[in-house]
Image (spheres, helix red, strand yellow):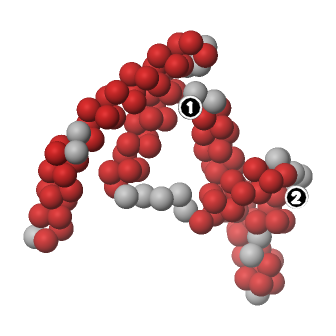
C-alpha cells in the first residue's frame, strides 16, 4: 500500500510543479525545432516521450550504456569495441560455449546502445 501512496504523492507533485505543462511546452519546442532543422517530427516526439517516461520512472542510463557512450565520445566507432567492453576476468572463467554466448549477448547489447547513442546524437543537435 505504501508504494501506491508514494506513486500518488509523486504524481501530485508533478501536477503542482507544472511538470506536464513543461513537457507539453518542450514537445512543442522540439517539434518546431525539428521542422526548422528538417528532422523527422515523429522521431523527435518519440525521443522526447521516452525521456519523459524515464524521468517519471526514475530510470537512469545503465552502466553498460554509459561505458559505450564514453567510448564513442572519446574515440568514435572502433573495430575492437567488443574487446574493450568485455569483462576479461569474467570472460577467462567461461567455457567455450559460454564465451560464445557471452560474446553474442555483448554484441546485441552493444548494438542497442550504439543505436540509442546515434539517436541521442542526432536529436541533440536540436538543443
User: For the residues marked 1 and 2, what is the alpha-carbon distance in whole angstroms?
Assistant: 31 Å
Sequence-earlier tag: 1 or 2: 2
The image shows residue 56 at horizontal and vertical percentages of 32, 51
Seen at 47% across and 16% down, the residue is: 32
- All told, the count of numbered labels is 2
Image quadrant where residue 89 sits:
bottom right
- Residue placed most toward the observer, 86 or 54: 54
Read off the residue under disc 1.
127
Which element is circle 1 on? loop
Q: Secondary structure at mark 2?
A: loop
- Residue 110 image label: none
Give me the residue at 69% from left, 47% from top.
114
Looking at this view, name the residue that lies furthest to the right.
79
The quadrant the N terminus occupies is: bottom left
Q: Which residue is mark 2?
A: 80
> Residue 34's spot in the image, x, y percent?
54, 19
Observer able to see residue 100: no
- Is residue 18 visible in this depiction of the protein? yes
Identified at 46% across, 20% down, the residue is 31
Q: Position of residue 62 (x, y in %)?
A: 55, 62
8 vs 17: above or below: below
- Left or right of 104, for residue 45: left
- 10 left or right of 22 in image: left
Left/right placement of residue 5 relative to residue 84 reads left
Residue 101 vs 43, above or below: the answer is below
Residue farthest toward the front in the current orientation of the protein: 17
Q: Quadrant of residue 123?
A: top right
Amino acid at each position: 500500500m505504501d508504494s501506491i501512496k508514494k506513486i500518488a504523492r509523486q504524481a501530485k507533485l508533478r501536477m503542482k510543479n507544472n511538470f506536464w505543462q513543461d513537457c507539453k511546452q518542450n514537445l512543442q519546442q522540439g517539434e518546431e525545432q525539428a521542422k526548422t532543422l528538417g528532422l523527422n517530427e515523429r522521431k523527435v516526439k518519440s525521443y522526447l516521450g521516452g525521456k519523459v517516461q524515464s524521468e517519471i520512472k526514475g530510470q537512469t542510463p545503465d552502466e553498460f550504456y554509459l561505458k559505450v557512450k564514453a567510448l564513442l565520445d572519446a574515440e568514435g566507432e572502433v573495430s575492437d569495441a567488443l574487446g574493450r567492453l568485455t569483462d576479461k576476468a569474467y570472460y577467462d572463467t567461461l567455457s567455450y560455449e559460454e564465451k560464445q554466448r557471452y560474446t553474442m549477448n555483448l554484441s546485441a547489447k552493444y548494438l542497442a546502445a550504439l543505436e540509442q547513442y546515434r539517436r541521442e546524437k542526432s536529436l541533440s543537435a536540436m538543443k
